[in-house]
Image (tube, coloured by chain):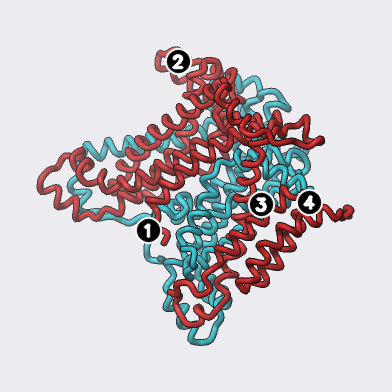
Chain colours: A cyan, B red
């Protein structure tokens, strides 16, 4: 595990000598273009966020030369007038952290179970059931969820949203942890067994302390998906427990379409998950494919 | 503290007794007690309609945990004797069961009723297959299906081709590959709802930079937001922009796992990049491509956030997807019975794709 990095260094010599010069130029041009293509929308959003409402109606690119940048959008969103923003970000963090917390605990236990033990029903069937949760269209389960949470008086509460989000991110946690424990050498656990440790002790004292990176990856992916969730929030948390994604979505209606302001909010909404994802690059492939592809 | 009514109490207790009995019979006494308590609470909260699906959950859970003396391949004797393995599995499995099986059963039931906002207080009644039969004559359905299919197939084609191409480019020993790879995966973690707004800013007909560039290159600005097919294309482009990196990282991983010896051997015969790709790279990444295609198929069929925030389903209803229509019918107009019937068709499609997927994946998860 530890030695197997996500990106294998490859065989530098053979590839370098065979690739002719002009191909390398083309390759680098493509790489620069692709990088530009990925970053361009972010860049355009950042530029737009420093424009006033009038300036945002002009397709200008270069600040200072073409337009006079203004921080009015950012100060409106994060300054004194931004109480609604602060509440929504607080809600988003509470919901995402809560869902991440529950999902990683359940995911560790279930993932360990699926990697270590054999069950009569067949482990692969349990895994299928877990995965099928991700495959189910959320709109199909939304109405029952809504009615269930309504009966439990959990509409517009943080815990109601935690419950919903936990359900959606749990498969990630289970499968990332299952993958990790499946690769964990059983010999180490056997040594602990000889010393008379119980299965729970082995999980907590032997397997888990070494699971830091996998656990972080599971937590970050769960956090990001819970943070990005919008549909259920739009139905079940429109008021007190409103997360930031929902606030972003209501921007255009509450202030007319103000592009600069919209860009500001959009950037705030995407920053945290995107930045967090940079720390778990090694696990992105297996995490996002729910363990289907080892990367 | 709400009044506890005998009827509701019984509505919870009676279905709860069945899984409790099964669990107790199998020697899982904790599960039996939990089943009884939860089913009773479910009954108190919503009578049979909550307690019965919940009881089914517990029944399935109790049956999943069968095989006390099932196949024993655990690492050691302690594991064999230990009951712990069931309690490791139980919380997660139960959570998933409760929140997938219950909604599925409940929405199946709803799809046979005339549940909607107007009669939510009077209670609703079963109307048989009426909801399903009216789907056929619903013009909105065919319209939204066209949009969904266009977006799904378009996004599949675009992301797979571009993603594979970019992966191929990056598979040449690139210095600083990690940095580029990190940059390229950034869109994956951005909230789709926010990306819809990004589309709004980028594709805006007057001030958007896409039209600005098109005009700069001598073309005419495209009416992204007023022409139906251009609007669909704009949604497609944003979705593809977000998900091409997904294909890219998976295919790159697949390409990097191809041993260099294979290429070295092949270079004795040919030096053409294209024939190397066709005869070595492609066959070896084909399984990964299939997996990605299936995953993307399921995901794009659910697409809803981007058209919702970008254009509100407009112009007119041009960018309303099938999922969007379900969402609007069920949770904006509160015609829940009909929406459930619409959703169930989607569920069946999802089940078919999931089944195909697991046929491929069985060995991986055993």
Callout in the foreground (2, 4): 4
Coordinates of residue B317 in the picture (x, y in percent): 58, 21
Q: CB under 8 Å between callouts 1 and 2?
A: no
Q: Few, some or many C-alpha atoms within 10 Å of disc 4 (few <14, some 14-19, many ≥20)?
A: many
- What is the C-alpha distance between the residues marked 4 and 3? 13 Å
Q: Is residue B175 left or right of residue A114?
A: left
Front one among B46 and B272:
B46
* Residue at the (53%, 37%) spot, across then down: B346
Same chain, labels 2 and 3: yes
Q: Few, some or many C-alpha atoms within 10 Å of disc 3 (few <14, some 14-19, many ≥20)?
A: many
Tag of residue B45? 4
Q: Quadrant of residue B98?
A: bottom right
Same chain, labels 2 and 4: yes
- What is the C-alpha distance between the residues marked 1 and 4? 42 Å
The residue pinned by badge 1 equals B363
Q: Is residue B295 above or below residue B241?
A: below
Please give the count of numbered marks on the rendered protein.
4
Callout in the foreground (3, 1): 3
| Helix, strand or loop at mark 1 | helix
Q: Is residue B115 visible?
A: yes
Q: CB under 8 Å between callouts 2 and 4?
A: no
Q: Few, some or many C-alpha atoms within 10 Å of disc 2 (few <14, some 14-19, many ≥20)?
A: few
Tag of residue B215? 2
Disc on the earlier residue, 1 or 2: 2
Q: CB under 8 Å between callouts 4 and 3?
A: no
């Amino acid at each position: 595990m530890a030695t197997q990095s996500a990106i294998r260094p490859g065989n530098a010599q053979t590839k370098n000598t065979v690739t002719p010069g002009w191909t390398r130029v083309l390759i680098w041009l493509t790489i620069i273009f692709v990088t530009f293509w990925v970053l361009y929308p972010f860049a355009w959003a950042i530029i737009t966020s420093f424009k006033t409402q009038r300036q945002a109606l002009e397709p200008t690119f270069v600040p200072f030369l073409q337009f006079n940048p203004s921080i009015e959008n950012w100060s409106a969103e994060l300054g004194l007038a931004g109480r609604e923003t602060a509440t929504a970000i607080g809600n988003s963090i509470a919901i995402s952290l809560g869902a991440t917390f529950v999902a990683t605990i359940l995911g560790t236990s279930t993932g360990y179970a699926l990697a270590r033990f054999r069950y009569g029903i067949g482990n692969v069937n349990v895994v299928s059931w877990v995965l099928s949760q991700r495959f189910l269209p959320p709109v199909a389960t939304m109405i029952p969820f809504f009615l269930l949470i309504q009966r439990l008086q959990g509409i517009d509460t943080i815990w109601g949203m935690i419950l919903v989000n936990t359900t959606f991110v749990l498969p990630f946690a289970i499968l990332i942890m299952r993958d990790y424990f499946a690769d964990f050498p059983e010999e180490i656990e056997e040594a602990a067994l000889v010393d008379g440790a119980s299965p729970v002790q082995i999980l907590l004292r032997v397997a888990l302390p070494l699971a830091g990176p996998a656990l972080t990856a599971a937590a970050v992916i769960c956090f990001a998906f819970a943070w990005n969730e919008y549909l259920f929030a739009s139905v079940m948390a429109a008021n007190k427990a409103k997360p930031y994604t929902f606030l972003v979505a209501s921007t255009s209606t509450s202030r007319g379409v103000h592009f600069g302001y919209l860009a500001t909010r959009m950037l705030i909404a995407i920053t945290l998950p995107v930045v967090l994802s940079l720390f778990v690059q090694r696990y992105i492939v297996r995490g996002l494919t729910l363990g289907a592809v080892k990367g | 503290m709400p009044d506890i009514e005998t009827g509701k109490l019984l509505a919870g207790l009676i279905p709860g007794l069945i899984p409790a009995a099964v669990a107790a019979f199998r020697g899982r006494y904790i599960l039996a007690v939990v089943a009884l308590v939860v089913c009773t609470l479910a009954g108190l909260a919503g009578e049979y309609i909550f307690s019965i699906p919940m009881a089914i959950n517990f029944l399935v859970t109790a049956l999943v945990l069968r095989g006390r003396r099932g196949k024993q391949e655990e690492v050691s004797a302690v594991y064999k004797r230990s009951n712990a393995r069931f309690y490791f599995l139980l919380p997660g499995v139960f959570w998933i069961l409760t929140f997938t099986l219950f909604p599925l059963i409940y929405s199946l039931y709803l799809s046979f009723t005339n549940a909607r906002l107007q009669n939510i207080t009077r209670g609703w009644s079963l109307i048989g297959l009426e909801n399903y039969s009216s789907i056929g004559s619903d013009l909105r359905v065919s319209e939204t299906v066209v949009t969904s299919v266009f977006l799904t197939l378009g996004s599949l084609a675009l992301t797979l081709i571009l993603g594979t191409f970019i992966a191929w480019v990056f598979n040449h020993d690139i210095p600083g590959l990690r940095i580029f790879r990190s940059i390229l995966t950034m869109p994956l973690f951005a909230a789709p709802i926010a990306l819809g707004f990004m589309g709004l800013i980028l594709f805006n007909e007057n001030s958007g930079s896409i039209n600005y560039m098109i005009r700069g290159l001598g073309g005419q600005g495209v009416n992204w937001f007023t022409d139906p097919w251009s609007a669909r294309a704009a949604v497609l482009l944003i979705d593809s922009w977000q998900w091409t990196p997904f294909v890219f990282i998976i295919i790159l991983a697949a390409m990097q796992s191809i041993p260099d010896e294979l290429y070295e051997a092949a270079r004795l015969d040919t030096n053409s990049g294209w024939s190397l790709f066709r005869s070595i790279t492609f066959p070896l990444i084909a399984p990964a491509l299939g997996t990605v295609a299936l995953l993307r198929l399921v995901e794009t069929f659910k697409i809803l956030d981007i058209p919702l925030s970008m254009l509100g389903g407009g112009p007119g209803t041009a960018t309303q997807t099938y999922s969007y229509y379900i969402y609007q019918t069920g949770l904006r107009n509160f015609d829940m019975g009909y929406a459930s019937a619409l959703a169930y068709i989607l569920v069946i499609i999802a089940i078919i794709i999931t089944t195909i997927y697991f046929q491929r994946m069985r060995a991986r998860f055993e």
